[in-house]
Image: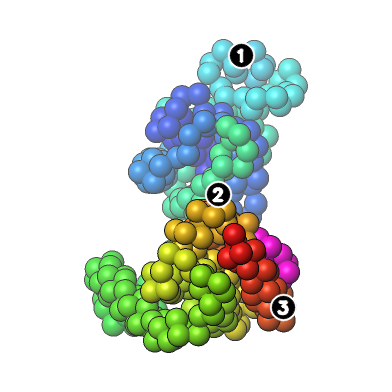
Amino acid sequence: TATHLLQSALKIVVNESVGQKGSLVAFNKLRFDFNSSQPISKDQISKVETLVNSWIMENYSLATKNMAKSEALEKGAVAMFGEKYDDEVRVVDVPGVSMELCGGTHVKSTSELGCFKIISEEGISAGVRRIEALAGQSALDYFSDRNSLVNQLSDLLKANPNQLFDRVKFLQSELINKNKDIQKMKAEIAYFKYSSLSSSAEKVGSFLMLVSQVDGLDGNSLQSAALDLTSQLGDKSIVILGGIPIPENKKLLFVVSLGKAIVKIGFHAGKLINDIAKICSGGGGGKPNFAQAGAREIDKLNDALKYAKNDLIKKLENHSDK
């Protein structure tokens, strides 16, 4: 019965063309699949629930009658598309609300359903949506569980239920601000970690090369470090940094930053970083002057940085001779 009421409500609220594409009626819930080219909005879901519950409270008596299929369809009874029916069919009628061909079990009056609650709505394939809903005791149990959850949240957040929304909004805002502070602190820590690295840059001909391991920096911080170091070392510098951002993550990050003069003589950061990262089963890419990559094999980090250093020395020496 609840499934019939749901289909009638969807036809009124969503579209008259809504039709059943499949259903499940279990002892504790119902599932209803129907055609719709668009998702059903929260406002529409609310209106469908309100409409079904109003029919439940209005206590319509159900009438069932066997009649010829042609007569039933002529009277406007809804048949499931693709379903095969005998010449004589059973019609379940909720006067003025719903009339469908159905051989299933029904209540005698809508008030026996008690209440109705939609618990989910989702797309399951192109043009087909699915609603899961509860009625009767299952719906009451659902409300009871939700009420218990609200009470737990109220205790946890030290707010009465009516204040929960504002309390959560406040905490979200506070969290955003705290995260900004954390990011600022991370940037400061990162600066102290890499600020002294410029002194360890090696001179190769007229160029400066810095290849180093820097752990504990996330992608943004490692990027900032490389760009700042390149700025400090000048247009003829190459900076390659690699490290483990968070040991528990079991991953590597690499960045390559090139000065303008290095790019001008034909070096490309994206090409360099791919050659380095693939040693650790990784890859990446970027612009001619800057690139970043990720990789998985932490134990090969030293091999990758050693390769990068030796490879750069050869390439830079060749250009220094010209």
User: Which of the two labelled residues, at mark 2 and mark 1, occupies the earlier sequence position?
Assistant: 1
- Name the front one of labels 3 and 1: 3
| Residue at which label 2 appears | 132
Quadrant of the rendered image containing residue 172: bottom left
Looking at the rendered structure, the secondary structure element under dot 3 is helix
Mark 1 is surrounded, within 10 Å at the Cα level, by few (under 14), some (14 to 19) or many (20 or more) other residues, namely few
Residue at 53% of width from left, 18% of height from top?
76
Magenta region: 273-282
Q: Which mark is residue 272?
A: none
Work out how far the residue at label 3 is from the one at label 1, CA to CA, in angstroms.
Answer: 82 Å
- Name the front one of labels 2 and 3: 3
Q: Main secondary structure of the magenta part?
A: helix
- Name the front one of labels 2 and 1: 2
Q: In terms of depth relative to the viewer, which is nearer, 283 or 174?
A: 283
Residue 278 falls inside the magenta stretch: yes
User: Which of the two labelled residues, at mark 3 and mark 1, occupies the earlier sequence position?
Assistant: 1
In the rendered image, which quarter contains the N terminus? Answer: top right
Q: Give the amino acid type for the residue marked by disc 1 in the picture.
A: Glu
- In this image, 320 relative to 87: left or right? left
Q: Is residue 276 above or below residue 52?
A: below
Residue at 63% of width from left, 68% of height from top?
317
Q: Which mark is residue 71?
A: 1
Q: Is residue 178 visible?
A: no
| Residue at which label 3 appears | 303
Q: Is residue 26 above or below residue 13?
A: below
Q: In terms of depth relative to the viewer, which is nearer, 183 or 302?
A: 302
Residue 121 falls inside the magenta stretch: no
Contact flag, marks 2 and 3 (Cβ < 8 Å): no
